[in-house]
Amino acid sequence: MTVLKERKVKAKSEANNVRKIREGLLMSKAELARRAGLSVLTIDRVEKGMTCRMDTKRKIILSLGLQLSDRDKVFIRED
């Protein structure tokens, strides 16, 4: 198995509504990335369900115009 395939297999998945909310606001990935101070690649990865750091989640939530207390609307907990 190639290294790239191993990374894809090892990557954890997190359900989220980032894309749904972003598109509902008629916002592009580039605009969300600019507002959050993140790369478009990071936004793309998060929208595909890849895990990210807590700070990245915080930046995305605030950049979508939401409060941190709305985190469960954006990032679905899988306990």
Image: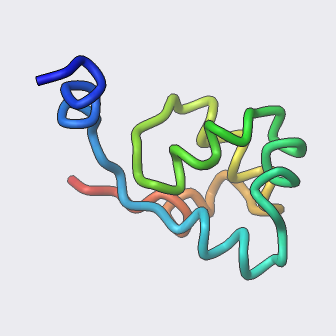
* Residue 46 relative to residue 10: left or right: right
Q: Going 75% across and 62% down the picture, which residue do you hit? A: 66
Instruction: Indicate the position of residue 26 as horizontal and vertical percent values.
Output: 83, 77
Q: Is residue 11 above or below residue 70?
A: above
* Quarter of the image that includes the N terminus: top left
* Residue 45 relative to residue 51: left or right: right
**Looking at the image, which is closer to me, 1 or 78?**
1
Q: Going 25% across and 56% down the picture, which residue do you hit? A: 78
Q: What colour scheme has been applied to the protein in the rendered image?
A: rainbow
Quadrant of the rendered image containing residue 35: top right
Q: Going 62% across and 34% down the picture, which residue do you hit? A: 56
**Looking at the image, which is closer to me, 22 or 71?**
22
Instruction: Indicate the position of residue 47 as horizontal and vertical percent values.
Output: 53, 56
Q: Is residue 19 above or below residue 58?
A: below
Instruction: Indicate the position of residue 72 as horizontal and vertical percent values.
Output: 49, 62
Q: Going 23% across and 31% down the picture, which residue do you hit? A: 5
Identity of the residue furthest to the bottom in this view: 24
Instruction: Indicate the position of residue 19 as horizontal and vertical percent values.
Output: 61, 67
* Residue 15 relative to residue 38: left or right: left
